[in-house]
Image: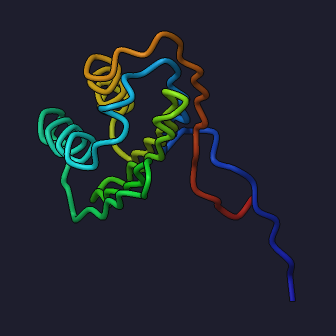
Amino acid sequence: MKREFLVQNPRPDGYHLLMELFGCDQDKLNSRKFLHQTVRSAVKKVGLTNLGSRFHQFQPQGVTGFTLLAQSHISLHSWPEFGYLVLDIFTCGDQAQADQLADLFLERLQPSRVNCQVVRKGYQYPRD
């Protein structure tokens, strides 16, 4: 049996933004309703397809949320006591859509500092 080796497709098929937002408003980060509405409105504004969401309010504080998209997902985790939010945006769609989503979050949360990492993902295929 011939063994096939897999190599990564050099064409990026997925665009993954890993973001840390510092210095955000604590009340916004502790509001499940605010964060869920922010995701819903941003997804709609950039033309992605929301397949469903699940957001959880922790006690005494903090929110975790996930939105499944036809094009991939958005997840977030907040630590209001530190003004800190971790945001994960992955899309198999257009890079511009992921960037627009990120911009909408930055506009609504007004962080004092942002760390951002981009991971490009592609499918695996057999090498000739």
Task: Look at 64% across and 39% down and name the residue there.
Answer: 10
Q: In this view, does 125 lie to the left or right of 101?
A: right
Residue that protrudes farthest toward the top in the picture: 112
Q: In which quarter of the image is residue 96?
A: top left
Residue 68 is situated, as x and y percent measured from the top left of the image, at: 32, 60
Asked whether 86 or 123 is in front, the reply is 86
Q: Is residue 20 left or right of residue 60?
A: right
Residue 51 is situated, as x and y percent measured from the top left of the image, at: 22, 64
Q: Is residue 78 above or below residue 24?
A: below
Asked whether 60 or 46 is in front, the reply is 60
Asked whether 73 or 29 is in front, the reply is 29
Q: In this view, does 57 lie above or below 116?
A: below
Asked if residue 111 can be seen in this view, the reply is yes
Task: Look at 55% across and 35% down and name the residue there.
Answer: 18
Q: In which quarter of the image is residue 117?
A: top right
Asked whether 59 or 109 is in front, the reply is 59
User: Image quadrant for the N terminus?
Assistant: bottom right
User: How many dots with numbers?
Assistant: 0
Task: Look at 35% across and 57% down and name the residue there.
Answer: 57
User: Image quadrant for the C terminus?
Assistant: bottom right
Q: Is residue 35 left or right of residue 80?
A: left
